[in-house]
Amino acid sequence: MLQLLVQSYLLIISINLFVGGDLVKMSCQRVSVSDKNALGASGRSTPVYEPLINEMNSYWMGSISIGTPAQTFNVDFDTGSSDLWIPSIRCLSSCGNRSRYNANISSTYRANGASFHIGYGDGSSINGRFDNDTVTIAGLAVTNQVFAEASNMSSFGGVRDGLLGLGYQSITSGGEAPVFYNMYKQNLIPQPIFSFYFNPDSSVVPGGELILGGVDTTKYTGSVTYVNVTVQGYWQFQANSITIGSTVICASSCNAIADTGTTLILGPTSQINALNAALGATYDPNTGWFAVNCSSRTQQGFPNVTFTIGGQAFTLSAIQYFFIWNTGQYYICYSVFNYSNIATWILGDYFLSRFYSIYNMGTNQVGFATSTSYNYTQAISSQTFQSTTTVATTSTTTKIISTTAAPTTTVTTAGTTTKINSTTAAVTTSTTNKIITTTAALTTSTTNKIITTTAAVTTGTTSKSTASTSTVTSAASDVIGRGISLIILFNMMILFVMQS
């Protein structure tokens, strides 16, 4: 039964991992001086902090409100998309227990009129309409913000109400200015910068923070490494190389996206195959994950994986890149490195929870630094990995030498032989001390993948929009919450079985 639960659990996670779609085709552009001037000069001198909730290391969500009086929603702040959408009061059973937006009770609501539809590769979908209202985050009220309210959600689970995209405007489904753009234009933050701190310790409250308008220098150590954004849609950049131990997985110009809305670390098929092969992990078609018996090596025997970005090495150890599962008889290490259906690496939360990330729309750069939670580990059984053995005392062997003279015993210790007069041979002994390394188990992971979004093009902040339909692809992480509530349920069932 436990094996069935494990497979079901991982399959639920994989729902979000293998949904098809293509990224939007975008031309590379940079923000011009006129664009920056158009953003305006902010009147606020300090950044604002939005506390985040860690949902089992699968995603981090925060609270926003929409309308007057405020209607509150929990959303996933996603750097891999640019739209804001939440469920509508017109959405009935398909929206489950999610909070719903009611335009009729908001005095700041303005009709927009454009429709939208988002279809996912697994058959799930969202459709509804665009609206305008005041959106408030961490006390900052962004007025006349275009957002989408979903009137129907098909085949979705999870506890998040919706999603707030923090990507560039070029990948919004309706052409609207994203929330962060308007936040800066309306002088609510001092700089066009935001940053994320994710704490991998899911027992800590808050579980992280989104900093709007700057950075929190208390949440990282050392210096920040910045790289230029190469395509202004997602936060895409080029890594110098990707290696596992001494094996080079990607030699140069490795395209990558920093995506807070994706849980795992995804890459091109051939490179993911090579990386997992170096771990000794094989693909399990029943779960869609790469797996290896943890006890096949010592913890240190699993090589580090290093992403070199801006000339700086960002390294993950085995305890940071494995999701560890106890079968009851042995431990399985599931690799968090899995397939992306695009020729780009996607650095999701398993990377971003170890490295503080900064997103600067003023300079079009992404920055990374070592998180203060980098070394966090959760205790696991000493039997998880193969034990590390060291010799504390030298092996002592006694040999009897037969001669006509007095019997002697030769004691060999550390390569030195000494003869001792004796008539009795000592029993051969060997004393060894075992050192057990106690480390940490990683928590659950869920990965959201690429979707295709079709929406009527809106006119930004205008009150009406004519329905001219355009197809745009959202980021590799826009699937919201599918399977999360089931994951929680399966966790509870598994704990019950293991404790029985």
Image (tube, helix red, strand yellow):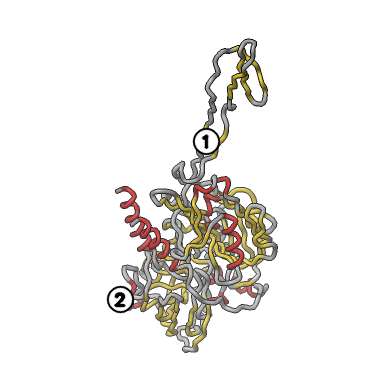
- What residue would you read off at disc 2? 92
The local secondary structure at tag 2 comes to loop
Residue 30 position by quadrant: bottom right
The residue at the point 36 percent across, 69 percent down is 69
Residue 3 position by quadrant: bottom left
User: Looking at the picture, does residue 89 appear above or below residue 52?
Assistant: below
The local secondary structure at tag 1 comes to strand
User: Disc 1 to disc 2, how far (Cα)?
Assistant: 58 Å
Q: Amino acid at mark 1?
A: Ile
User: Looking at the picture, does residue 447 appear above or below residue 408?
Assistant: below
308 or 405, nearer to the observer: 405
The residue at the point 57 percent across, 78 percent down is 24
Q: Identify the image quadrant of the N terminus.
A: bottom left
Q: Position of residue 401 (x, y in %)?
A: 62, 18
The label shown at residue 100 is none
Q: Is residue 212 in view from this perspective? A: no
- Which-is-in-front pick, marks 1 and 2? 1
Q: Position of residue 274 (x, y in %)?
A: 61, 61
Mark toward the start of the polypeptide (1 vs 2): 2
109 or 358, nearer to the observer: 358
Q: Amino acid at mark 2?
A: Leu
Q: Residues within 10 Å of mark 2 (few under 14, many from 20)?
A: some
The residue at the point 47 percent across, 86 percent down is 465
Name the side, left or right, on which 265 lies relative to 104.
right
